[in-house]
Image: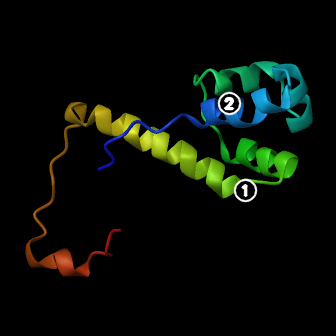
Amino acid sequence: MSMYNPAHPGEILKELVIEPLGLSIKEMAYHLGINRETLSKILSERSAITPEIALRLEMTLGKPNAAHWLRLQNAFDLWQARQHSTDIHVIPFDLGNMGHMLPATS
């Protein structure tokens, strides 16, 4: 389990792209082809980067690619979920010696 709190990709987008380029939210939203409110929610960490937004970022910026933006979002989401894992109640299977039939996890 990761022991750090990964940054929300909206924070990364704001600090490493929008601010250094001196862009306004309105200008960046225009280039992405989305409305300002949608981008504002991402930058304020109230919305996630969706596959479509990730693709728009790739097409607008060139780098990093869409998969990278989605990995950042996934890392953030998973870390957040793990912080509340004590609230998750499940009944695990007893797989006994069937465990060898399950795919390996990385």
Q: Is residue 10 left or right of residue 79?
A: right
Secondary structure found at label 2: helix
Q: Is residue 88 left or right of residue 15?
A: left
Q: Residues within 10 Å of mark 1 (few under 14, many from 20)?
A: some
Give the camera-side residue of 18 and 38. Answer: 18
Query: For the view shown, which residue lies furthest in the front direction?
Result: 20
Q: Quadrant of residue 31?
A: top right
The CA distance from mark 1 to mark 2 is 17 Å
Residue located 56% across and 46% down the image:
72
Q: Can you tell which of label 1 and label 2 is closer to the viewer?
A: 2
Secondary structure found at label 1: loop
Colour scheme of the rendered structure: rainbow
Q: Position of residue 5 (x, y in %)?
A: 40, 36
- The residue singled out by tag 2 in the image is 15
Three-letter amino acid code of the residue under disc 1: Asn
- The residue singled out by tag 1 in the image is 65
Disc 1 vs disc 2: Cβ atoms closer than 8 Å?
no
Q: Quadrant of residue 19?
A: top right
